């Protein structure tokens, strides 16, 4: 059986995973939004954004597989299929589904054992994080978008809990679409989070805009100035980035809250 030799990755997490598996030579095209690993931006031609792709450029690269992500790229997948290109599209929404994606990619590039080892390393980090004893588990509101306000997607909610926080909208994390995770301002006020974390999916977070929302001056996180930004590249990419740097940032924020509470 001949495995794919020329792969186009339309999102960052698959590029990062294939690099981590030591098979970067198979990648012939990447998303223009790719920042991890940084060397990929220097080595590989950019063929897409997130919601659109240059089909002619992709076809010129003669890929034997194009890999994408989510319903947002469904039209790209359809157009590629119509032009005779083989595609594989993931739609992972949880940590377990991220692990499934890594295993599938490991199989595709003939590095299944290494993929298992990678997952074991991520699991070890997760288990170590869970064992931390926190005296003050903070209530956390994670905002994925500001207008409309969207709460954190599944894997983000899980990572908040792994880091020792309590996601105030954890009940929404199983929702597949962003529309199902819309929240109202009053919902956040009523939940009164201790920490607000925002990652506005590709644009810089405006903390002053968050602070000035009507009625938000009553929220503990606003009163204590606990508003944080995490770059979308390390928390909203469902792959190695969120399981490493993203989780580390959440732990840093939540540990900081606990240290301050102990000292007060």
Image (tube, grey):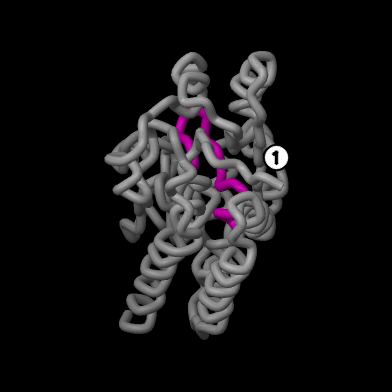
* Spot occupied by residue 42 in the image (x, y as percentages of width and height): 27, 40
Residue 107 magenta = no
| Vertical side of 261 occupied by 243: above or below | above
- Of the pair 176 and 120, the residue shown nearer to us: 120
Q: Which residue is drawn at 44% across and 41% down?
A: 215
Question: Which residue does the image show at 58% across and 78% down from the upper left?
Answer: 127
Q: Looking at the image, which is closer to me, 147 or 155?
A: 155
- Identify the secondary structure beneath mark 1: loop
| Frontmost residue, 97 versus 47 | 47
State the image coordinates of residue 118 (x, y, percent, origin top left). Answer: 54, 68
Which residue does the numbered mark 1 point to in the structure image?
176
Q: Viewed as shown, does residue 79 lie left or right of 248?
A: right
Q: Residue at x 43, y 59 (%)?
A: 246
Residue 263, placed above or below residue 227: below
Q: How crowded is mark 1: few (under 14 residues within 10 Å), some or many (20 or more)?
A: some
- Answer yes or no: is residue 102 visible: yes
* Outermost residue toward the front in this view: 1
Picture residue at 40% right of the left edge, 57% below the top: 221
Instruction: Examine the structure image and report whether residue 154 is included in the region drawn in magenta.
Output: yes
Residue 205 at x, y percent in the picture: 34, 40
Magenta range is 143-157
Residue 168 seen by the camera: no
Residue 5's x, y, as percent?
55, 41
């Amino acid at each position: 059986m001949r495995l794919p030799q020329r792969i186009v990755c339309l999102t960052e997490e698959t590029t990062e995973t294939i690099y981590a598996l030591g098979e970067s030579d198979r990648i012939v095209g990447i998303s223009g939004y790719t920042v991890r690993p940084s060397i990929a931006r220097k080595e590989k031609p950019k063929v897409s954004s997130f919601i659109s792709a240059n089909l002619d450029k992709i076809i010129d690269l003669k890929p034997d597989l194009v890999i994408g992500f989510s319903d947002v790229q469904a039209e790209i997948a359809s157009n590629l299929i119509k032009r005779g290109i083989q595609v594989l599209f993931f739609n992972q929404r949880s940590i377990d589904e991220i692990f499934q994606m890594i295993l599938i990619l490991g199989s595709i590039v003939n590095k299944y054992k290494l993929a298992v080892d990678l997952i074991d390393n991520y699991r070890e980090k997760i288990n170590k994080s869970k064992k931390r004893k926190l005296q003050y588990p903070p209530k956390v509101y994670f905002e994925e978008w500001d207008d409309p306000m969207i709460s954190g997607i599944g894997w983000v909610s899980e990572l908040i809990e792994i880091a020792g926080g309590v996601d105030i909208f954890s009940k929404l994390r199983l929702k597949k679409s962003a529309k199902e995770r819309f929240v109202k301002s009053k919902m956040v006020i009523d939940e009164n989070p201790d920490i607000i974390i925002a990652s506005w999916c590709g644009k810089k977070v405006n903390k002053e805009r968050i602070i000035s929302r009507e009625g938000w001056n009553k929220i503990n996180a606003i009163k204590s100035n606990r508003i944080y930004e995490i770059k979308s590249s390390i928390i909203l990419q469902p792959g190695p980035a969120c399981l490493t740097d993203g989780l580390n940032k959440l732990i840093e924020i939540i540990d900081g809250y606990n240290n301050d509470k102990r000292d007060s």
